[in-house]
Amino acid sequence: MESLITRPKGPRLVGNKLNAIKCNTCGHIRYPARTYCNKCQGTDFSSILIGPKGVVATYSTTYKKKLNDKQRIFGVVQLFTEDGEDSFILSGTFDTENYDDVKIGKKIELLPNDKYNIFKILED
Amino acid sequence: MRNVAVIGAGVSPFGRLDALLYQEIGRPPVNDAIENAGIDRKLIQSCYYGTCGGVGVGHEIMSETGLIGIPITRVVNACSSGSNAFRLAYMDIASGMSDCVIAMGIEKMKNASMAVVGGGTRFQIEAKAYSYGSPFSGGGGGGMPAGFALMGRAHMKMFGTKREDFANIVVKSRKNATKNHKAEFQTKMTIDEVLNDVMINDPLTRSQCCPRTDGAAAVILMSEDYVKEHHIDTPIWIKASAMGSHLGGGDPSYPPGLSTDADTAKKVFKMAGVEPKDFYERGFGECHDCFSVSELVHYEDFGFCKKGEGADMINDGVVEIDGDLPINPSGGLLSVGHPLGATGTRQIAEVFWQMRKDKEVAKRQVPDEHLDLAFTHTLGQPGLGFTNVMHVFSRDL
């Protein structure tokens, strides 16, 4: 029976790659790992590492109440496996305060971080 | 399943009602709904009410309106709480358990923060634990507008949608709400005023985000047997009810739409035996326009147009009250306001009154040829997941 104790445990990241699982029945990717596939309810999985490279899928920025507030630019990226066969959508914050630095389709890299998903914008 | 009809509705004024108690907000629409239905309140056998922050207020309101003693169930499902209460009332009658049920929604937004919606402190702790190592970690802390802003940016890039297209949704909403004396905002806005409003999350300016509003709405439902027995005039029949859920994130199809909305629309239209094109010929609807972006992507997710063509729906006037497919004739969440628990029942009251040509909506009456068929839709985000509820209504049994 599933419980907090039996819930699969594992490191969030392996290096700077997502430690995810792929359903062997339907191919759906789950991150973080869980006991059941939420697409086909299967229980047979393979480990899969995703990232750290990806592209910006979409982005926006927070409203600054005061001029000296930090401009936080956040968004969603599509991270790929090394062979490019699989990908996963992940939200997080970009490592820049300049809104013009971020564009949809720009290449990014997931930075190792224990708390948040931080994306570094890569030069073209 | 038995046939079920809506037979009466009542809606409170929507706005900032800090000075009023829950009972003072909720009692009038309950009494109005019973009067609108033209029935003896003794016929009501059960109550479902949607609210996120109003613990136990249903009992107090039912007590004050002479309905205490019947089963009363509180429904908490974020922005879908009211429509979820209505769905349970429908199922209660359809299953044969009851013949006459009241569904109510109520909210005082001061008491309904996202932490409350999610279940209080326990939610905050679990959300923190979940976000550690999840697809949502570090999402920017922008709250609800952030998610739809991201969707809007993706839509702009993929389909060339312009900021003006999103802003036009608000212009239409405000125009309709000038004819709704219950709406929080009853004044027009120009496209420049919308675009030059305070920026919240690019591309969403303040007026493209629905206000935090207080209010309540109630509807009375009745079985076909009772409708005949009690000679109810112009009942509006519930042809279908569907609900879906989804845990956001991780789905590459997420931007720029919501797969759970598309799935639920297919389910509810199939159950009703209709197709999206039928609404063009003889229908209208109320959808969950919590943000300008959301209304535009709903057009596409429901199949009213192809992906990427949502902007044409608003720019060509298709969704205006006198258009080919009127959407949100009330003014929607953007102008009427969005008291989480009340929105679903408020939408159902709107389509009921429209289809019955009630004096309540005389100033914003949808043309006759569109009154055969109607839909309602709410999209809620209880915690980190999505839940949506859709209904289809018809004047014919």
Image: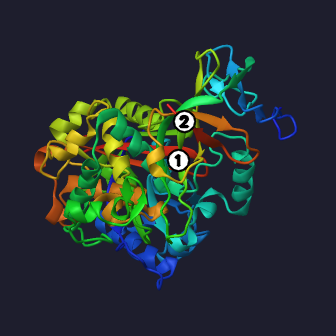
Give residue A77's mark: 2
In the rendered image, the residue lying farthest to the front is A123
Q: Which amino acid does label 1 sit on?
A: Met
Question: Which chain is indicated by disc 1?
Answer: B
Residue B39 seen in the figure = no
Residue B225 in percent (x, y) is at 36, 47
Give the structural element (helix, strand or loop) at label 1.
Answer: loop
Residue A10 in percent (x, y) is at 82, 32
Of tags 2 and 1, which is closer to the observer? 2
Q: How far apart are marks 2 and 1 (CA)?
A: 49 Å
Question: Which chain is indicated by disc 2?
Answer: A
Q: What residue type is labelled 2?
A: Val
Give the structural element (helix, strand or loop) at label 2.
Answer: strand
Question: Callout 1: 10 Å neighbours few (<14), some, many (20+)?
Answer: few
Front residue of B16 and A49:
A49
Question: Callout 2: 10 Å neighbours few (<14), some, many (20+)?
Answer: many
Q: Is residue B25 above or below residue B397?
A: below
Q: In this view, does B359 lie above or below B392?
A: below
* Label 1 sits on residue: B97
